[in-house]
Image (tube, rainbow, N blue to C red):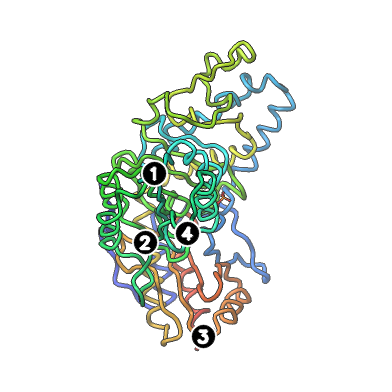
Amino acid sequence: MSRESPTSLPAFEASEAFARRMDAADPLAGFRERFLIPRAANGEPATYLAGNSLGLQPATVRQYLNEELEDWAIHGVEGHFRGRRPWYSYHEMFRESGAKLVGAKPGEVVMMNSLTVNLHLMMATFYRPTSDRYRIVIEDTAFPSDTYAVKSQLKCHGYDPADALILLQPRSGEHTIRTEDVLDLLDERGHEIALFVPAGVNFLTGQFFDIATMTAAAKKQGCVVGWDMAHAVGNVELWLHDWEVDFAVWCNYKYLNSGPGAVGGCFVHERHGRNLGLPRFAGWWGNDPDTRFRMHLQPEFTPRAGADGWQISNPPIFSLTPVKASIEIFEEATMPMLREKSWKLTGFLRFLLERDAGGVFEIVTPRDPRAHGCQLSILVHDRARERFAALEEAGVICDFREPDVIRAAPVPLYNTFVDVWRFARVLADAVG
Ligand SMILES: *Cc1c(COP(=O)(O)O)cnc(C)c1O
């Protein structure tokens, strides 16, 4: 399985009437009602294009949270087994649905901790440097938390990041990274690289990497391959199992709409999940459930097979509950349908922006539909902050990355073609 392309894109027209026709014909349009849309200052629904930063609240979250509060009130500690969704096995609700989101097999995915913590836990197991193979690869514009995590791991192992960290870079004058350049790097220096761990979709440029090709090339060189899927999960289709990715980590609060600081996700390929001898940072929730409650009688850790064996603590149920509410919606809408709509939304956005750019801004996200998800990143050459302020003023919620990038992400679950139209109009006025 590789990255797919859209089956067909309509002939776009630059009019609000066209946007309305697209919304009327959209088979996923009904899902918008299942989310709480923030309001602009004038009381109208905001044009919310920030689902790549924080997805919107599924309407069912409040009810599900109330049910957990009730179960706690009614059952106390016995809620672990007697609740309507027993807390003891709560995380197992995501075995299939969570795995499906990233193209994994049941047992390869667990929801736990948060993204950066999971990245550290995965590196504790999978970053095994030796004197001639100790380098780590990420992108040059990696999300800062990943950069800090990777540099601190290097230091913990006694390496100098200035020497041991390799950054994937665009060619001079370009904004995104060419697959061929990554393959050349792996050819030349693959034997020095212990861990190849970039993001699947770059947070700044919106570039969706050719994960299958890069993973295969890195593995051929003997590197361990992990991916940070924070901006990829719920956004693009993934086949982590078939791509033979060693591990992956992500957060659930961006495209997965599970609320601020929601519990994150972690994928461990089954070939490693079966290897109970792998070193790891252990805690009781990663232990075989059959002996977990022998407590002080069981001082030797026996990991549970699969990704579950990397859990440490018992999960925060109130932070996992929104994950359940959200994934239920993904189960209904399905990733292939969402991706198909996403291509239409971003295609429409690109079409409108390119008409209006007038040399003032350019889209840095790759044009190839296989190489981007929902987000388009707009590099503004002149008075970027002021133009962004005009968007805010007009009730558009998107985001600004210093010094000059506006990121807009129409999300197929709850954004409309009219949202895209409004955003493009306001930006054009701010430029014009
Ligand atoms: C959003 C994001 C993070 C955030 O990390 P947390 O541990 O969830 O706070 C880290 N890395 C990437 C690539 C991200 O997109």
Mark with earlier residue (2, 4): 4
Mark 1 and mark 3 residues within 8 Å of each other at the beta carbon: no
Mark whose residue sits in front, 2 or 4: 4
**Amino acid type indicated by mark 2:** His
Disc 4 element? helix
Please give the name of the residue rendered at 40% of the width and 29% of the height, measured from the top-left corner.
Answer: 273
Dot 3 alpha-carbon crowd within 10 angstroms: few under 14, some 14 to 19, many 20 or more: few
Compute the Cα span from label 1 to label 4. Answer: 16 Å
Residue nearest the viewer, comparing 310 with 280: 280
User: For mark 4, what is the residue?
Assistant: 162
Disc 3 element? loop
User: Can residue 223 be seen here?
Assistant: yes
Please give the name of the residue rendered at 52% of the width and 43% of the height, measured from the top-left corner.
Answer: 120
**Amino acid type indicated by mark 3:** Asp
Compute the Cα span from label 1 to label 3. Answer: 48 Å
Mark 3 and mark 4 residues within 8 Å of each other at the beta carbon: no
Residue nearest the viewer, comparing 432 with 261: 261
Compute the Cα span from label 3 to label 4. Answer: 34 Å
**Amino acid type indicated by mark 1:** Ser
User: For mark 1, what is the residue?
Assistant: 131
- Above/below status of 274 relative to 341: above
Compute the Cα span from label 2 to label 3. Answer: 25 Å
Mark whose residue sits in front, 1 or 2: 1
Mark with earlier residue (2, 3): 2
